[in-house]
Amino acid sequence: MEMSEAALKKIPGGVTAAKGFKAASTAAGIKYKDRKDMAMIYSQAPCRSAGTFTTNVVKAAPVKWDKDQVTGGAAAHAVVINAGIANACTGEEGMAYCSRTAAAAAQVLGIPQESVLVASTGVIGKQLPMDRIEAGVKAMAPLLDGSVQSGTDASRAIMTTDTKNKEVAVQVELGGVQVTIGGMCKGSGMIHPNMCTMLGFVTTDAAISKELLQEALSQDIKDTYNMISVDGDTSTNDTVLVLANGLAGNPEITEKNSDYMAFCKALNYINETLSKKMAGDGEGCTALFEVTVKGAATKDQARVLAKSVITSSLTKAAIFGHDANWGRILCAMGYSGADFDPEKVDLFFESTAGRMQIIKDGVAVDYSEEEATKILSEPEVTAIADIKMGDARATAWGCDLTYDYVKINADYRS
Amino acid sequence: MEMSEAALKKIPGGVTAAKGFKAASTAAGIKYKDRKDMAMIYSQAPCRSAGTFTTNVVKAAPVKWDKDQVTGGAAAHAVVINAGIANACTGEEGMAYCSRTAAAAAQVLGIPQESVLVASTGVIGKQLPMDRIEAGVKAMAPLLDGSVQSGTDASRAIMTTDTKNKEVAVQVELGGVQVTIGGMCKGSGMIHPNMCTMLGFVTTDAAISKELLQEALSQDIKDTYNMISVDGDTSTNDTVLVLANGLAGNPEITEKNSDYMAFCKALNYINETLSKKMAGDGEGCTALFEVTVKGAATKDQARVLAKSVITSSLTKAAIFGHDANWGRILCAMGYSGADFDPEKVDLFFESTAGRMQIIKDGVAVDYSEEEATKILSEPEVTAIADIKMGDARATAWGCDLTYDYVKINADYRS
């Protein structure tokens, strides 16, 4: 992305920020008590859609449903999302529930069944309580609303072990017309997107061809969702959907011109922000851990190295302990599968508390452990490794490994 | 291994079980106080050696030293091991310390320097206190002893975060002559051998050619050390050494005859036993978690699937919680990279408390959660997945993910 940062204007809100998008949410009683657990996104105009889905061989039923609709080319009009049960490993019964959910929404919204996308997150292997899902769909339709608050409520309704709701919106000028992109997502365990139980939903009023919308998304996830990890577990349900309804009125983007680049930049801002929010709210975590590898020969090499570090359990535990255990970082780079010369690596730690060099040419410099611990005690800490092979760089985002991660996952189902 | 189990006779001891092998240990004060932290293995006769070493790009100095000696073909006569400092990421200074350690041992033992192998485990990035290492070598030489106790003491001296020492010995008849193989190893974090900060040392009085000794080891680690994981972190120091001094007097094994098969079987017993001991004593763990994948099309496919499950943080946390969260097992199989049909998978849990089927054809059977929790509450639990594609099978060993793993690794250096 070569354009200047100034072209982007951050605004409040999420999936309802763009023109013509509405959201609703409700407490359907799927698993949780005393909280909302279903959400709906609806566009006044039919949308072009793009999607990226889990690479896990075990794909949840909603992933299969959405993939069929998005690649089939039907216009997308609405998304129905539930938290609590993932509808994964549910066989034919689970597939039938996707179509019943879509049918229920289609009927109450007066749109085609194939224009309804569905997404689920939660426990694997349990069947959805279809009566409650259908009742939830009916309850949400009359509540659809384009306010910022209704988008925020939706972003809360899709949370599972997340501690914070996650949404972001931005505006960019395309062909002299102001276009808005907004999104929401949820984490926060089984997060090792490839593509990416994260669910992400991005809405925009930009006019853009379906082909370029998909390409923009497919390219961008490599540097955003696919560069985060909470626990190395690639979920059965990972889904990112982008809906574009064209209501901004910009000249339709049909080629890779400057408008396309500007759109990609805005999309990147949304996806990177949502990705960092997911990593920073990983199950049980106390810190966002950012790792940049620079001086790489290729972008792919930089990505593999950065991702290996944020995925290392030992490194993550050291970050929790505010311990500058740089040997574990070098070790994780070493087993990543990417080649480099360990004796050329420089390593730096950085946070709002300062920046310091830890390794020069593969060997520790004479640094203060006390100072390093101070830097590593902030809620966002960065490690920067320079491998001195070229000009490529990549950044990955993870989090520390804590007692609470274990606690959450030792009794998640109970 | 087609032979009957009866051909193997388990005996007490470890590295001193085979004829002509002695061990010693001492408190050199490298890092720990009030405990031994150095060990020495010595053979009365020069040995043929075989070794497998970490695949990590970042290789500790002792790994480089041993690789040179083992592949260079020099006879091996002694091994010097220290715990507390890994001598990894230590540059040229670290390499010089390997040769100084070997020189010190060579002098006091009256053997060539290149016949001394060295191994280190502990913190990465710190230099060894050479004066203490040299003093330790000198202190150990006169203590060398062939008793079971002295082997056991050595296996204790090499421990880091291990809670139990690990040794095993077995006898097998080769060409009518009784041959002994014994071994010791240590874990217990940064364990994801590929080959394998595990260190493993196997001694035998068998007469076998160097080529076949190496081949027997290289093949066997694929089903033993390389099938365990504590935390997914492949160490910089992983080393397994086998020393064979030929003192049993069996007809030398120079071809793949029935004696070779019997030797391989005994070696497999040693390596599998040591591997399971490491997995079952993983940092902070409360249970050994064994995963068998059967019905695979190929052995490799079975290995990839089994290893992916024992490596999954979410599955490991569920085992800690005694939670039959089978969705995580299927999920981990799904992202392993191996292909299979999730809708054909049968899954069983097994322990001394019983055996039960959890999934049939990819969907949960009507099992009792209470009963499943009972089975999963034992110190050794097994999951068996049948993917119904062929006849191949593989087993991997891991452990649960616990609060104590986080605790140990958040402040390992302090």
Image (cartoon, coloured by chain):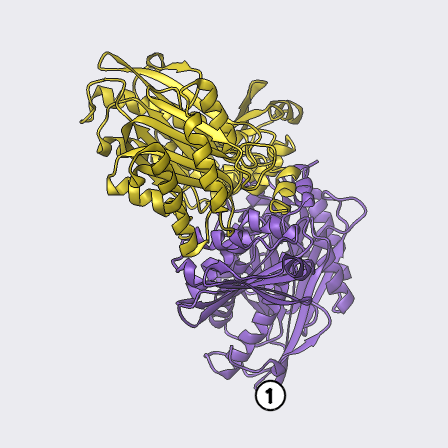
Chain colours: A yellow, B purple
The quarter holding residue B157 reads: bottom right
- Dot 1: within a 10 Å radius of its alpha carbon, few (fewer than 14), some, or many (20 or more) residues? few
- Name the one closer to the observer, A213 or A108: A108
What is the total number of numbered labels drawn onto the structure image?
Answer: 1
- Name the one closer to the observer, B132 or B54: B54
Rendered view: A250 above or below B106: above
Point out residue A101 in the picture as x, y percentages from the top left corner. Answer: 40, 42
Point out residue A373 in the picture as x, y percentages from the top left corner. Answer: 64, 26
Residue position marked by numbered label 1 in the rendering: B176
Left or right relative to B374: residue A388: left
Residue A359 is at least partly visible in this image = no
Seen as rendered, the residue at the extreme bottom is B176
Q: Quadrant of the C terminus of chain B?
A: top right
Residue B206 is at least partly visible in this image = yes
Left or right relative to B6: residue B259: left
The quarter holding residue B110 reads: bottom right
Rendered view: B139 above or below A155: below
Seen as rendered, the residue at the extreme right is B34
Point out residue B115 in the picture as x, y percentages from the top left corner. Answer: 58, 60
Q: Secondary structure at mark 1?
A: loop
Left or right relative to B35: residue B69: left
Query: Chain under label 1?
Result: B
Point out residue B346 in the picture as x, y percentages from the top left corner. Answer: 49, 64
